[in-house]
Image (cartoon, helix red, strand yellow):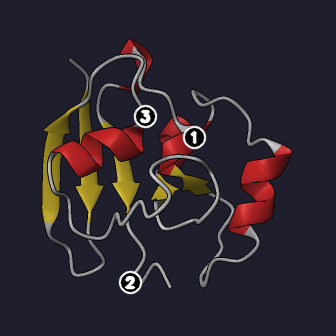
C-alpha cells in the first residue's frame, strides 16, 4: 500500500497506508488524521478536506476539475498547490505523497 503523509499546521506528522483506488481523504478519515473534516464525505461539495500537495507530487495528479476549482475558490488560504484530498485517487505512483494541512478548514 502506498504511504501517505499528512503534516498538520503545528508540524505533527501522520503517516498512513493508502489503499489504491480510494481517495487520499478516505485514507485520512480511516486513520483519524486531525485537520481533514470531510463533511461532505467526498462529494466535492464542501472543501473541508483541503490540503497542500508538495510540489514534487503535483505532476503525478490528475488535473483539477472545474468543480474542484470552484470549491477551492472558497478556501481561506488558497495556494497554487491547493487540492481537495477527496479528488485525489491513490495510485502506486503516489507512494510517499505528502500533504500539508491548513491551519483551519473554515
Q: Residue at x 15, y 60 (%)?
A: 13
Q: Residue at x 60, y 85 (%)?
A: 76
For label 2, count other residues whose C-alpha is less than 10 Å away and answer few (under 14), some (14-19) or many (20+).
Answer: few
The answer to whether any part of residue 28 appears in the image is: yes
Find disc 1 in the rendering and name its residue. Answer: 87
| Mark 3 or mark 1: whose residue is earlier in sequence | 3
Judged from the image, the secondary structure of the residue bearing numbered disc 3 is loop
Separation (CA) of disc 3 from disc 1: 7 Å
Q: Confirm or deny contact between disc 1 and disc 2 (CB under 8 A).
A: no
Q: Residue at x 44, y 64 (%)?
A: 39
| Mark 2 or mark 3: whose residue is earlier in sequence | 3
Question: Which of the two residues, 95 or 16, is positioned nearer the viewer here?
Answer: 16
Give coordinates of residue 64: x percent, y percent: 74, 42
Question: Which of the two residues, 65 or 59, is positioned nearer the viewer here?
Answer: 65
Left or right, 10 with reference to 97: left
Find disc 3 in the rendering and name its residue. Answer: 23
Mark 1 vs mark 2, foreground winner is 1
| Mark 1 or mark 2: whose residue is earlier in sequence | 1
Give coordinates of residue 36: x percent, y percent: 34, 63
Left or right, 16 with reference to 81: left
Q: Confirm or deny contact between disc 3 and disc 1 (CB under 8 A).
A: yes
Judged from the image, the secondary structure of the residue bearing numbered disc 1 is helix
Mark 2 vs mark 3, foreground winner is 3
Find disc 2 in the rendering and name its residue. Answer: 103
Separation (CA) of disc 1 from disc 2: 20 Å
- On residue 4, the disc is none
Judged from the image, the secondary structure of the residue bearing numbered disc 2 is loop
Give coordinates of residue 59: x percent, y percent: 63, 32
For label 3, count other residues whose C-alpha is less than 10 Å away and answer few (under 14), some (14-19) or many (20+).
Answer: many
Question: Which of the two residues, 61 or 56, is positioned nearer the viewer here?
Answer: 61
Amino acid at each position: 500500500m502506498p504511504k501517505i503523509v499528512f503534516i498538520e499546521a503545528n508540524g505533527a506528522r501522520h503517516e498512513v497506508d493508502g489503499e489504491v483506488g480510494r481517495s487520499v481523504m478516505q485514507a485520512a478519515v480511516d486513520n483519524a488524521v486531525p485537520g481533514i473534516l470531510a463533511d461532505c464525505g467526498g462529494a466535492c461539495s464542501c472543501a473541508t478536506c483541503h490540503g497542500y500537495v508538495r510540489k514534487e507530487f503535483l505532476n503525478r495528479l490528475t488535473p483539477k476539475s472545474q468543480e474542484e476549482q470552484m470549491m477551492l475558490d472558497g478556501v481561506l488560504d488558497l495556494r497554487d498547490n491547493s487540492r481537495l484530498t477527496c479528488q485525489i485517487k491513490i495510485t502506486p505512483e503516489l507512494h510517499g505523497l505528502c500533504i500539508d494541512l491548513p491551519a483551519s478548514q473554515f
